[in-house]
Image (cartoon, rainbow, N blue to C red):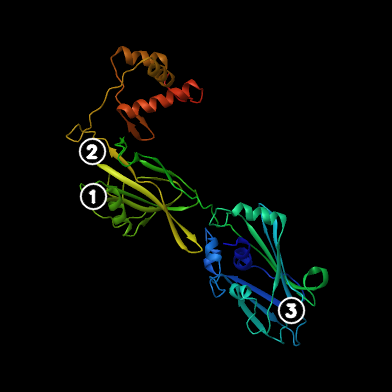
Amino acid sequence: MDLKNVLFAGFFASILFAPGLNAQNNSQIELDLQAEPLLSNSQLISLVSLALDETGSGARLFTFAIQNMSGAESAPLFIEYTATTSKFGLILEAVQRERTPFRLLPGQVVVASNNDIAQSRLPGISGTINFSANFTNSGEDFLNSLKGSSQLPADVYTITMSIFSNAPGADGGTFETSQTVTIGENLVEDDESIFSLSPGDVAGSDMIISNPFPEFRWEGRPDQTYRLIVVNKVEGEGPETLIESALSTDAARSNMSANLLQFENLDITTQGTSFQFPSTGVQPLRSGETYYWQVFSVLQTSRGEDIRSSEIWEFTLSDQSGGRNEIAREVIEVDGEIFLLLSAILGEEKALELQENGYQLSSLELDDTEFRGELANEKLEELLEKLREGKLKFTGSSR
């Protein structure tokens, strides 16, 4: 793919054209520019979607109208535009060539699209219009930054389109009208991954939690809308199958009830990167049961919707009743290092009291997630290492 041709014929011709304001002037030439929602609403813009097909056409990204408001034929007209980004500055200058002007009859309106620009024509105008487009040194740096990427980088792009008469450009022509528009506020980086944080861990980890109203937390864009699904484990069905079935039904908006499937505990869309499991409008989590959860986001792209998802995580709600579903606890020996950690948390006097009364460490709970056995040991070792490095501080301890 020739990135220069793609960006010139596709993107930089197309982003002329989120709605903007005409410059105030006394010209009889008016310019109106409109973007298609495909471009103006996109969070990701694929470079492939900007490429032209074999006929020299591509996706319809914008339309523009130029009108002669006077009662006489216009002078020879020329289009010029520049592109800048907030990160690189001025990157592109494109000027209509002097030998390919166009004229408008009294009251004539020319309506064109990015495909017309790519094919060097204006509907209703005889002859062709050609451009001399040059990438600046900053533009070359911008192009180099795109190598290996299939998406236009998140940035703020400013385009100025101007019309001159009699000669191209400010050096020889007479300025008629212009628009300056900015897009990019909706663009996001291509790597919009979602990483689960709590409760539980990846499917198959046998994580146990004790809070029947856990806070689900994940790492992602805080201004994004997410869909959170929680399902109950069903014998003979994998977590992927259960969540896929849940996806086939509509989710509820935040703080609203949804029609949940029999095995579905929660299915909701929410803004931000956390959600507290509610006490109403859902099927409650039950002691001793195992649950799977996954988070999804939908990005609007220039090629349609792009669905991103987190890993499927699992947790089991501990059985507080001591019934048949209770999971056996493994006792952890309170050695010198663990005693050091307990002393830092509880104070040395309280830690000694617990040790003298025969208490043993059977589990460790962090962020509503309960760790036992080897997993508890691993977490304790992590905490001890941070304590030794001075990276762990405790506040509000009962000393």
Above or below, 97 against 182 in this view is below
Residue visible at 33% across and 17% down in the picture: 334
Residue visible at 31% across and 12% down in the picture: 356
Mark 2 Cα-neighbour bin, 10 Å: few <14, some 14–19, many ≥20: many
List the residue tagged with mark 1: 237
In this view of the protein, can residue 19 be seen by the observer? no
Mark 1 Cα-neighbour bin, 10 Å: few <14, some 14–19, many ≥20: few
List the residue tagged with mark 2: 288
Q: Position of residue 174 (x, y in %)?
A: 80, 74
Q: Secondary structure at mark 1?
A: loop
List the residue tagged with mark 3: 101
Q: Earlier in the sequence, mark 2 or mark 1?
A: 1
* Mark pair 3, 1: CA separation: 68 Å
Above or below, 140 against 292 in this view is below
The amino acid type of the residue labelled 3 equals Pro
From the viewer's perspective, is 228 left or right of 75?
left
Q: Position of residue 213 (x, y in %)?
A: 33, 41
Q: Earlier in the sequence, mark 2 or mark 3?
A: 3
Q: Position of residue 308 (x, y in %)?
A: 43, 53
In this view of the protein, can residue 365 be seen by the observer? yes
Nearest to the eye among marks 2 and 3: give it: 3
How many marks can you see?
A: 3
Q: Are marks 3 and 1 in contact (CB under 8 Å)?
A: no
Mark 3 Cα-neighbour bin, 10 Å: few <14, some 14–19, many ≥20: many
* Mark pair 2, 1: CA separation: 18 Å
Q: Secondary structure at mark 3?
A: loop
